[in-house]
Image (cartoon, grey):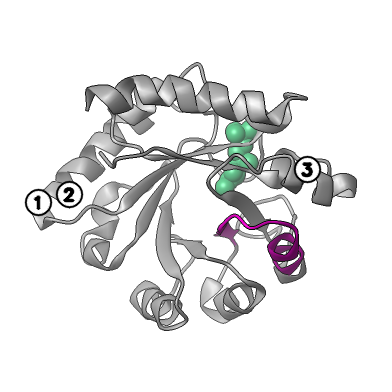
Amino acid sequence: MRDKVLISPSILSADILDLGDDIRSISTADMVHIDVMDGNFVPNLTFGPNVVAAAKRASDLPLDVHLMVDNPDETYGLYLEAGADMLCFHYEAAKHAHRIVNAIHAAGAKACVALNPGTPVCALSSIISELDMVLIMTVDPGFGGQSFIPSSLDKLKDLEELCHSRGVAPRVEVDGGVSAKNVATVVAAGADVIVAGSAVFGDADRAAAIAAIRSAASVIDMEA
Ligand code: DX5
Ligand code: ZN
């Protein structure tokens, strides 16, 4: 457990035609989560590098870019150039995960690998010590507003064991179906970066929504 749980609102649930204002409305968060979907790895199609570059101009927060794309080996560089501070790609989509992680670090950014709900944590066994963050998908990727998959809690425990056995402590991000109602449970299971799309942008008062998630998470934070 880290000293602080970070909140990373997903702009997938923002108003795409009012994106600048929506990004500015989450200035009390810790990162901006940008879901890049290519219509192949997942059915949905969202943002590309140009939106990442525009978000960089609109916000001082670090950009937490989540690539849900086939073959990130060919496109990760575009997102680094666009200003991604944390670049996350899917284990299931990468051909050469280790090479991508090295390239992300060489560019001065932080590297994260994401796992789908159907992918076991042991897939990260050979790369875990290279990672700044692991993203545990707590819904099947592709859409906002889905329900949290309860077995994700066991996966968070598996990840904790793997990290402990290797003596490493990457950040652990959870993504999908997380809100103030269940954030304490995921933090107790080992998560310390919370993605929240509908739970933040579904509330007209974004600062209040972020504060509610932070407060619910900090109950466990203080006990740890
Ligand atoms: C889903 C995306 C998520 C999504 C989460 O594939 O990776 O980041 O925006 O949305 P909520 O918080 O509404 O489940
Ligand atoms: Zn995401």
Distance from the alpha carbon under mark 2 to that under mark 3: 37 Å
Mark 2, ligand 2, within 8 Å: the answer is: no
Is 135 situated above or below 80?
above
Q: Quadrant of the C terminus?
A: top left
Q: Amino acid at mark 3?
A: Asp
Q: Secondary structure at mark 3?
A: helix
Mark 3 Cα within 10 Å, few/some/many (few <14, many 20+)? some
Distance from the alpha carbon under mark 1 to that under mark 2: 5 Å
**Which residue lies under the disc numbered 1?**
165
Q: Which residues are magenta?
A: 51-68
Residue at the outermost right position: 17
Q: Secondary structure at mark 1?
A: helix
Mark 3, ligand 1, within 8 Å: the answer is: no
Magenta stretch: includes residue 185: no
Task: Please indicate, yes or no, whether residue 131 appears anywhere in the rendered image.
Answer: yes
Q: Give the residue displayed 21% in from the left and 59% down from the top.
A: 125
Mark 1, ligand 2, within 8 Å: the answer is: no
Mark 2 Cα within 10 Å, few/some/many (few <14, many 20+)? some
Image position of 27 (left or right of 76)? right
Q: Give the residue displayed 64% in from the left and 23% down from the top.
A: 208
**Which residue lies under the disc numbered 3?**
22
**Which residue lies under the disc numbered 2?**
162
Distance from the alpha carbon under mark 1 to that under mark 3: 41 Å
